[in-house]
Image (cartoon, rainbow, N blue to C red):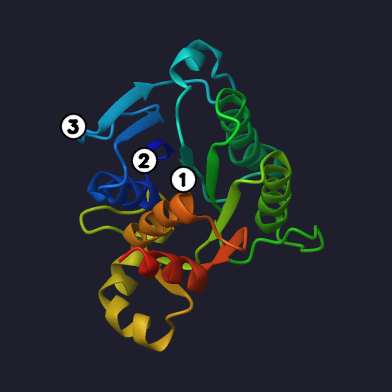
Amino acid sequence: MRIVIFGATGMVGQGVLEACLRADAVTEVLVIGRSPTGRSHTKLREIRHEDFTDFGPIADQLTGWDACLFCLGVSALGMSEADYRAITVDYTLAAARALLAANPELTFCYVSGAGTDGTGKTRMMWARVKGELENTLMEMSPNAYMFRPAFIVPLQGTKAKTKAYVALYRVVTPLYPLLRRLAPRHVTTSLRLGEAMIQIIRDGAPERVLETADINAAAARGD
């Protein structure tokens, strides 16, 4: 399968990229981003692209793909709703529209987050915005899947870009084996998330919104 990844330089995206490069079922990976991954692999090709609201300039390179793994995102901490929407919603929908126009059967996997609310009733801005985005993506394509991980342990050697998260992960990551035993339904790794996505691309899933337990179960099916 041929896969496009957005957000491959982030904490989550690095693990997802690694899962794709390791998987025999994945034959080619295209990373679209503003900065290079620093990776070199026979499967990997990268496109440097600045304007994530307009993919017209690279439209000729967006055909022939089986799936998109959209891992790009920002923390809502300190952001206005307008700024958060511009990145969270506008970038995602622009990518989805461009790829689905070129590949109508494409599987679109979006990394959302635990607590996302698609009802619009929550007072948490980020949860409401992501919920609206999830609903739109699922309306756009029957092959769109929303991944809502809770706590994600990053791939060794990677770290979050948000300073507050860096401190949190520095403390909690060594406790992953214990957390996995005590709260297996709430903890996963960025690598397992990527493995789950690959499994969903191959076999689909009855549910289109996957919480942490569903993500771990999907990854286990591919082991």
Binning the other alpha carbons within 10 Å of mark 3 as few (below 14), some (14 to 19) or many (20 upward) gives few
The answer to whether mark 1 and mark 2 are in CB contact below 8 A is: yes
Query: How many numbered marks appear?
Result: 3
Binning the other alpha carbons within 10 Å of mark 2 as few (below 14), some (14 to 19) or many (20 upward) gives many
Identify the residue shown where x is 23% and y is 49%: 22
Q: Gap in Å between the C-alphas at discs 3 and 1?
A: 22 Å
Residue 25 image label: none
**Tag 3 residue:** 42
Identify the residue shown where x is 55% and y is 43%: 108
Residue 56 against residue 208 in the figure, above or below: above
Binning the other alpha carbons within 10 Å of mark 1 as few (below 14), some (14 to 19) or many (20 upward) gives many
User: Considering the numbered disc 1 on the image, is that residue within a helix, a strand or a loop?
Assistant: loop
Residue 71 image label: 1
Q: Disc 2 residue type?
A: Ala
Q: Disc 3 residue type?
A: Thr
**Tag 2 residue:** 8
The residue closer to the viewer here, 70 or 166, is 70
> Closer to the N terminus: mark 2 or mark 3?
2
Identify the residue shown where x is 50% and y is 64%: 149
